[in-house]
Amino acid sequence: MPKFTLLDGGMGRELKRSGAPFCHPYWSAQALMEAPQTVMATHQRFVDAGAEVIITNSYACVPFHLGENLYNQRGSALTRLAGKLAREVADSASYNIKVAGSLPPPMGSYRPDLFDSARAVEIYQMLLDEQAPYVDLWIAETIASLEELRAIIPVVTQSARPCHYAFTLSDNAEKDPQLRSGQSVESAVALACAAGAAGIMFNCSVPEVMHKAIEKTLAYCQDERSNIVVGVYANNFAPIGKTHRANSDDLATRELSPQEYLHYAKQWYALGARFIGGCCGIGPEHIKVLADWKKSNI
C-alpha cells in the first residue's frame, strides 16, 4: 500500500493543555515570548509520537494576535525564533523530521470578511523571510477565501521550497465542500495548481467535511494529470459558524478520541490523502495512534 506522511497535531491547544503560558489574544505566541522551552517540548512530544513533519509555532506571530505595537517591536524576532526552535527539535531527532513553515491567516482564522489584501502581503513576506533559513517546506494554513490565496501566492512562490496550500472549509457536511467564504473547493484547487502547488490540504475544519473535499481535489488533479499531494489535518472543534469571533476563547471542543480520529484518517487515506495529521485539539496521543496504524498496516 502507498505510504503517507504523518504531520503533527495542534500546537496551540497542546501548549495550553501542557500548562505553557497561554492566553488571548497572544495565544501560542505567548509561549514564544515567555517560555520558548515549552515550545520545543511540545514539538518533541509530537516527534516522540511519530510525527514526520512538524509545523513551526508562528501561527500567532501576526498583528491580529500580537497587536500592532508588539508586532512592530517583536513580530519578526518571534517568527524567526519559531523557525529556529522547530529546526533544533528536528535536527536532534533520531529519524528524519522535516520542518514546515507556517504561513497563517494575518487577519484571523475563519473570517474571510476581515481580510485586507494589501496589508496581508506585507505580513506574509515577513513570515516567509524570517522562517526561510529553518524550513524544508511551506504550509499556507487555514486559507478561507480565494482572496487570501491570491495574496499569498506571489509571496510564497519566491521560495524554491515546495508549498502546500491548506484550506479551511465550511463545517457543513450536507453541502458540497466550500471554503469558509462560500467559494468552491474546485476554484481554490484550480488556482493553487496553476501556481505550482506541491500539495493541496484541508485543515482546521470538522472531520466530516474532509472526504468530499478530497474527492473533488483528486478528481481535478487527475484531470490535469497533476502530481500534487493531497492532505488533511482536521480539528477537534464543534462546527464553527460565519459569525464566530476570531481569536476568542469560546470555541466548543468535541473531544474526539484517538481511535475516533483514526477512523476518519483511514477514510481519508482510502480516498487518496497522503499527508495526514491534526489541527487544533488533536494531540500527541492522536498522532501516536496514527503512527502505530501506519507502522502496522502500510
Image (cartoon, helix red, strand yellow):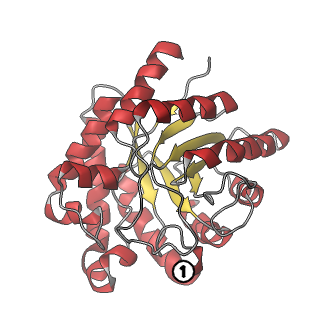
- Residue 57 location (% of width, % of height): 33, 56
The amino acid type, in three-letter code, at marker 1 is Leu
Disc 1 crowd, CA 10 A, few/some/many (<14, 14-19, 20+): few
Give the camera-side residue of 40 and 88: 40
Give the camera-side residue of 218 and 226: 218
Taking 82 as reference, is 201 above or below it?
A: above
Left or right: residue 163 versus residue 290 is right
Q: Quadrant of residue 75?
A: bottom left
Helix, strand or loop at disc 1? helix
Q: Quadrant of residue 146?
A: bottom right
Residue at 41% from the left image edge and 36% from the top image edge:
257
Q: Quadrant of the N terminus?
A: top right
Q: Quadrant of the C terminus?
A: top right
Residue at 46% from the left image edge and 63% from the top image edge:
104
Asked if one can make out residue 199 in the rendered structure from this viewpoint, the answer is no
Taking 209 as reference, is 258 above or below it?
A: above
Give the camera-side residue of 198 and 166: 166
Residue tagged 1: 114
Asked if one can make out residue 145 in the rendered structure from this viewpoint, the answer is yes
Give the camera-side residue of 179 and 229: 179
Residue at 59% from the left image edge and 65% from the top image edge:
144
